[in-house]
Structures are given as C-alpha cells and as structure tokens.
C-alpha cells in the first residue's frame, strides 16, 4: 500500500442550484462535487504538486471502448504521447477489493498502460505491469 501525503490546496468550491461544484484545475471547468470527485481532485493535486506530473499530460474521465461498452477511466497519465498510468478513484467508503482491481484490469485491456493505481483517499494501491504479471509497488514512479 502507498502512503499518500496529500498537499494543502485551496479548492474552489461553490453552490449552484442546491448542488456543490468544485473547479477542476485540469479540465478547467466546474464539476459536481461527489464523494468520488473529492477523491479524484485530491489525487490530482497529489500527482501535480507532490509527484510533479505535468498537468497537460493528465486526462480526466477518458472514454475507452471495451468491445461495444464505453467506460471512463478516472485519471490517465500520458508519457511520450502514450497512456502510461490509469488511476481508479473510489469514494472513501468503498473497499479496494478484488472487484475494483478487476475493473481497472478491464480498463487496461482497452487502454494498455505500465502502471495501475487504485485509491479511495484513505488507501492507495499501485501496480506495475511486467512480463512477470502484476507487481505491487510501494511508491508511484517518478515522471
């Protein structure tokens, strides 16, 4: 399991028509603030501020095709113009058990990457895909 120290960040939050919205600094738009979105926004700031991943190489809710199904990856990190990492965010009360890992592994079929990350804000697991299979790693790779 990774130890994530989320950076302090002044999120822009507003209320509109009885809904809370948060400004997404990557998509440059206001998004409905759901429990999962809160995790995604905090993890994005961790990637940008702590790991120094370039904001311009992050894609949010990237649509992928799995056969005839369309799915959305929460965060995709690109490196050398290729998908490099998929991050699946869940709200805090969701356990990161086998079904969540299976979900991100299915996403990896439609969008092959080297790294897979699962987070619910409290717990974060990361894996590297290699010829030997799925290997859990204790730190996100340096960009």
Image: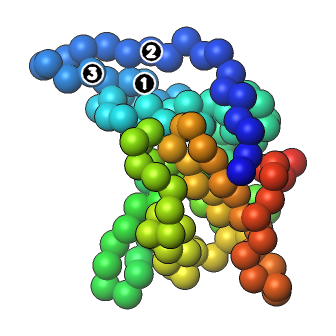
Report the number of discs.
3
Label 1 belongs to which residue? 23
Q: Residue at x 50, y 69 (%)?
A: 98
Is label 2 in a helix, a strand or a loop?
loop
First along the sequence among labels 2 and 3: 2
Q: Residue furthest left?
A: 17
Query: Which residue carries the number 3 mark?
Result: 20
Q: Which mark is residue 46?
A: none
Disc 3 crowd rating (10 Å Cα; few below 14, some 14-19, many 20+) is: some
Tell which residue pokes out farthest to the right in this image: 142
Q: Position of residue 134 (x, y in %)?
A: 73, 76
Q: Are marks 2 and 1 in contact (CB under 8 Å)?
A: yes
For image coordinates 54% across by 37% down, the residue present is: 121
The residue drawn where x is 74% and y is 39% is 3
- Return the residue nearer the eye: 117 or 16: 117
Tell us which disc is closer to us: 3 or 1: 3
Q: Where is residue 38, by image quadrant? A: top left
> Which residue is nearer to you in this view: 90 or 9?
90
Q: Answer yes or no: do the residues labelled 2 and 3 have beta carbons within 8 Å?
A: no
Q: Residue at x 77, y 31 (%)?
A: 50
- Mark number for residue 12? 2
The x and y percentages for residue 91 are 41, 42
């Amino acid at each position: 399991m990774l130890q994530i120290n989320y950076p302090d960040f002044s999120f822009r939050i507003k209320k509109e028509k009885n809904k809370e919205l948060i400004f997404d600094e990557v998509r440059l738009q206001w998004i409905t603030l759901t429990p999962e979105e809160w995790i995604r926004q905090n993890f994005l700031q961790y990637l940008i501020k702590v790991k120094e991943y370039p904001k311009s190489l992050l894609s949010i809710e990237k649509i992928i095709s799995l056969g005839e199904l369309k799915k959305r990856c929460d965060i995709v990190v690109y490196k050398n113009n290729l998908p490099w990492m998929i991050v699946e965010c869940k709200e805090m009360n969701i356990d990161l058990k086998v079904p969540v890992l299976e979900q991100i592994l299915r996403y990896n079929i439609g969008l092959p990457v080297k790294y897979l990350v699962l987070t619910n804000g409290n717990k974060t697991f990361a894996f590297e895909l290699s010829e030997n299979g799925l290997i859990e790693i204790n730190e996100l790779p340096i960009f």
